[in-house]
Image (cartoon, grey):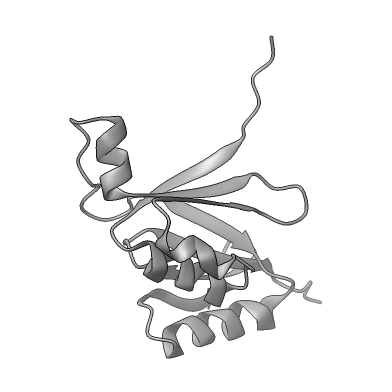
Amino acid sequence: MSIRFHFIGLSTADMARSLGFYRALGFAIPADADDQPHAEFQLPDGGPLMAWDTHETAKSIDPDWTPPAGTARASLAFECEDVAQVDKTYARLVDAGYEGALEPFDGFWGQRYAVVLDPDGNNVDLFAPLPPTG
């Protein structure tokens, strides 16, 4: 038997608000998912599923479950087409009222990098390779 990675699961205090963030990021998540206790979205290009459960759903599965707290609950990284898309996506999300955690910068490791927080405090990293120099 082989094991394969299937989905990324996040818990959310507000399904509609969380899914709204990921729509603003650029994913076509159906609007009828907003009032569901569980939602799934197939990431493009053969990526895994992303799934969200309300806190109530998580608690119904495991009565001892408690919502994550503190920083860096989860970190999701999304590769952008190019450096300009990192900057534009970060600005679009911050302008829409989402919290910027790290403004776009050129990392010493060769990537343009930025971090925005989703409504539940998860890091959403945006990155693209820096163009070659010289």
Give the residue furthest to the top: 1
- Residue 107 in sight in this render: no
Going by the image, does 63 lie left or right of 58?
left
Residue 19 x %, y %: 47, 66
Q: How many marks?
A: 0
Horizontal side, residue 120 vs residue 64: left or right = right
Residue at 33% x, 53% y is 72
Q: Residue at x 19, y 41 (%)?
A: 66
Quarter of the image with the N terminus is top right
State left or right for residue 6 relative to residue 19: right
To which quarter of the image does residue 120 belong?
A: bottom left
Q: Residue 59 or 65: which is nearer the viewer?
A: 59
| Residue closest to the eye, 75 or 44 | 44
Quarter location, residue 127:
bottom right
- Please say whether residue 66 is visible from this viewpoint: yes
Counting from the top left corner in percent of width and height, residue 82 is at: 73, 75
Q: In this view, does 99 lie above or below 125?
A: below
Q: Is residue 97 above or below residue 30?
A: below
Q: Position of residue 5 (x, y in %)?
A: 62, 32
**Residue at (32, 63) in percent of width and height:** 14
In the image, taking residue 17 as reference, residue 8 lies left or right, namely right
Residue 107's spot in the image, x, y percent? 55, 67
- State the residue at coordinates (62%, 73%): 26
Q: Nearer the viewer, residue 91 or 41?
A: 41
Q: Quadrant of the C terminus?
A: bottom right
